[in-house]
Amino acid sequence: MRKKLAVIAAILGFFSLSVSAKDLVITPGYYDVDFSKYDFIDTSLNTIQFPQGNASFEPFFKKLDTLVFENRGKVRILHIGGSHLQADVISGRIREHMIKEYPGASAGRGFVFPYSAARTNTPASYASYYKGIWDKSKNVQKEITKPLGLLGIAISTSDPRAEITLLLDKYNSEPIWGETSFRLFGFSDSNNVTPVLRIDSMDVFGTLDSASQSFVFTSPRPIDTIQIAFRWADTTKQAEVAAFITDSLFKDSVARADSLARVADSLRRDSLGLLPSASSRTAELAADSMFQGDCEDVLDTNCLNRDEDLQGAKRDSSAVDTVPPRPRFTLTGILAENNAPGITYSNVGINGAKVANYFEETCPLFEKEMSYYRPDLVIFAIGINDANVEVFNDRQFRDEYDMLIKRILKVSPKTAFIFETNNDSYRKVRKKKYVQHPNGEVARKAFFMLADKYKAGVWDKFSIMGGLGSMAKWEKADLAKKDKVHFKTAGYQLLGDMFYKALMQAYFDHIADLPAEEPTQAPQAIQAKKQ
């Protein structure tokens, strides 16, 4: 056996390399899983299958070789899907394996996004917070107002108080991330807003890369908290508008509290027969209204813009058509890395996403942002939403995957692909009534056909978890949710454990197939022979 095999076994300390992939057993410890209580899971199928061989994986495997044996280079992995991936539990588990099993091999967290500002769930592996008022656009919406990129989501703001914060180590028992390089993808409509990276109360300005519509930042030290503020070109106007909004929020809170007090008082007087006429009540409430126009909520950005413009118009009636809109910034993603050799593992997912949601019409910036990541491996997990229909057109499904794959190969032609078949699922027919969904098996065959076409790998999740009807068993074992589509945390983590095991075994098989090296003699032995 090639001596490198022993080296990587010592480094990773995870698999017993004396057995085949079929019989491989997780070693005792952190990743120990007792599969005896999950007899419905077919662990013998937990491999990456290569219908046309693994030749297309050579570039990916060789980059891993360079990293493992020479401590050089970066390996980038992209896992893309729908709600399973936005939650980042299965992908987070795989990332966690890579970081903990090969300490010091992290080249950064990869793509992240302040999902909280878009009023949707942030991946479970980090926390996001925001200030100010933000609009959102997602690739699953019927009407998309902003150009989207690789992540399929964007947020925009004209609020002078706007900030975003990402805490990468929020849920880690000890710090893992230390990022030094950041590329913030986004743009200002009129080039009058600039994002700044805030570190230790200091503003670090980035370099605008107009070709990629991004800002490049370098941190003076490794950080695990990404705090971004937005600076208007006209800082005086920014301060004035911020003060106006803050004052309006305060007045609005006072007015609402007063209104609630008046309602309570009215109810009390009504119970005593002392309530005034409806007309007097209407006049009273109108007098208390903070806005006399259409604005009823101070948190309505468009309404605030109109209100501000109208106030300016009242001061100068000739300025109605010349009042400029507030500066606006749109953010589509943040790539966080460091300068060390290692692995970067990014998850991309939007709840409800289908394959077509990543097309040119929806995500025109997809290829531009992808070109700055250039994944060595893409794991496709899109399909559960495509197949969750009464009549599933598998031919159309494959054609749509063709279009998406072409977009990736256009900017990253050596990328290797793994198709993750859909999990088994049930279809809801009425309240609390679910029926088995045979489309999982149909989609499974489509994934194998795609793998055959693109010389890709397949991780057959559908068969591994037990095939048709197995989701009910996963639910009974407390691994899946009642909707019989999504998993609980324990279920996602179990899937992540198994996928990582299958991926590493594929890599170890690659090492085992390398030609043997001639053993080298120690200098002392050579000297002894000469004597």
Image: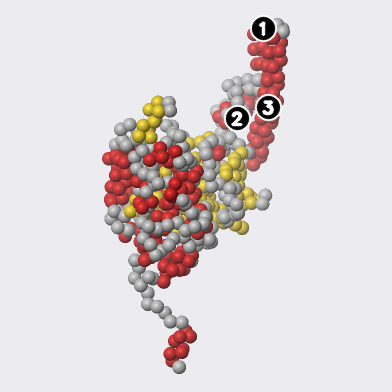
For the residue pair 430 and 514, the one nearer the viewer reads as 430
In the picture, residue 351 is in which quadrant?
Answer: top left
Label 1 residue SS: loop
Task: Sort mark 2 into few (<14), some (14-19) or many (20+) by Cα contacts within 10 Å.
Answer: some
Find disc 2 in the rendering and name its residue.
Answer: 299
Of callouts 2 and 3, the N-terminal one: 3
What type is the residue that disc 1 sits on? Ser
Find disc 1 in the rendering and name its residue.
Answer: 277
> What x and y, as percent, mark residue 377?
40, 54
Task: Sort mark 1 into few (<14), some (14-19) or many (20+) by Cα contacts within 10 Å.
Answer: few
Label 3 residue SS: helix
With respect to residue 448, does 134 lie above or below?
Answer: above
Residue depicted at x 28% and y 47%: 449
Of callouts 1 and 3, the N-terminal one: 3
For the residue pair 27 and 371, the one nearer the viewer reads as 27
Q: CA distance from mark 1 to mark 2?
A: 32 Å
Q: Residue 253, which numbered label?
A: 3
Q: How is the image coloured?
A: secondary structure
Residue depicted at x 58% and y 35%: 133
> What x and y, as percent, mark residue 522?
46, 82
Identify the image quadrant of the C terminus: bottom left
> Is residue 410 something that shows in the picture?
no
Residue depicted at x 37% and y 74%: 517
Q: CA distance from mark 2 to mark 3?
A: 12 Å
Residue 498 horizontal side relative to residue 189, left or right = left
